[in-house]
Image: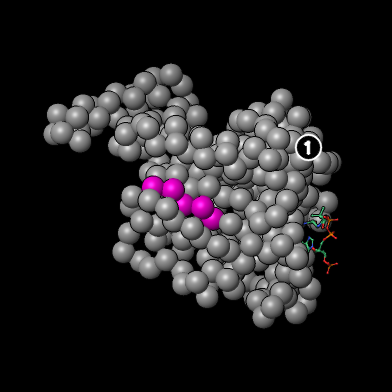
Amino acid sequence: MSTKLPTEQELTQARLRLEIDGAVATVVLDRLDRRNAMTARTWHTLARIGDALPDDVRVVVFRGEGDTFSAGIDLAMFDPEGPDGEPSLLAQAQQAAQSDSGRAELEEIIAGVQRGFTWLRRPEVVTIAAVRGHAIGAGFQLALSCDIRILAEDAQLCMKEPALGLVPDLTGTKPLVDLVGVHRAMELCLTARTVDAGEARELRLAELVVPAAELSDTVADLTGALLTVPAGAASATKRVLQRAADASGLEEAAAAERTAQVERLFALLSGE
Ligand code: CAA
């Protein structure tokens, strides 16, 4: 990638830490005193990390500092003055409501923050959410944006947005519906209730549930296992699985497999 990663100062301002160790990057939501609540700056900085991630990074792990994944959006985003000099979401909406182009402009603003979440689906990386404690609202959507969710036994997931008068808009609705089905997704979102780790496993919202003390070792083991598969095959396989999930039928998925396999065979022939 040609763009530059955020500087340490920019990461700190966004309440993030980024650790890159060879093929593994770890993004830490780093705002213990606010239970790792996130602002628009956090999401723009996440997008910049995605834009500039070194090509040799193959696994990206997301975790929260301390015993919480994330309390979601910083509630100060709804105060008229906004959090720490950032614009208030409600003030932006108020301004948008006063002009003809305001609706489109506000959608543009939301599209900008969604970029912090969409890149987690890129086939070149496998994204893992390592979830301790609460993952609320935007925190839950961040975990849902990951390919694999490993939950500690103390994890608690909640799609809080409807309870605040809003909809989940950080790209979490599609993976939630894909995972639990539209009817369970409605029940979870429209009650804004909390799902504990045991239920999350039953609902397939967690690939694994482990004691909190074993979370980081489990993630390290998984990361090691993911890295045993050749990079080209891993990204091609993630791509065909994504196509299969969205395919309208078997033939579309089978066609995607054929195209990808030809590419793989050619790559093997050329010594990849
Ligand atoms: N924004 C800002 N500050 C937050 C916060 C948030 N989302 N969540 C927690 N904090 C702050 C608290 O105000 C508190 O600050 P003080 O020490 O100054 O009082 C500090 O973090 C610790 O919080 P608690 O004492 O409440 O900690 P707890 O461990 O008892 O509870 C919690 C943790 C369950 C996460 C609880 O804090 C909570 O429910 N927070 C609010 C969660 C929420 O409603 N998030 C928004 C979801 S919607 C969304 O994210 C997306 C969207 O677009 C709307």
Q: Is residue 26 magenta?
A: yes
In the rendered image, which residue does mark 1 sit on? Answer: 195
Q: Is residue 103 magenta?
A: no
Which stretch did the figure color magenta? Answer: 23-27
Instruction: Give percent across and percent down for residue 12.
Output: 58, 71
The residue positioned 46% from the left and 69% from the top of the image is 6
Quadrant of res 205 = top right
User: What kind of residue is marked 1?
Assistant: Val
- The quarter of the image that holds ligand 1 is bottom right
Quadrant of res 253 = top left
The residue positioned 76% from the left and 29% from the top of the image is 199
Instruction: Give percent across and percent down for residue 165.
Output: 81, 56
Label 1 crowd (10 A; few <14 / some 14-19 / many >=20): some
Residue 201 visible in the displayed image: yes
The residue positioned 49% from the left and 58% from the top of the image is 19
The answer to whether 7 is drawn above or below residue 17 in the figure is below
The answer to whether 108 is drawn above or below residue 266 in the figure is below
Q: Nearer the viewer, residue 9 or 22?
A: 22
Q: Is residue 174 left or right of residue 163?
A: left
Examine the residues drawn in magenta and state their main secondary structure.
strand
Q: Is residue 88 left or right of residue 172?
A: right
Instruction: Give percent across and percent down for residue 53.
Output: 40, 57
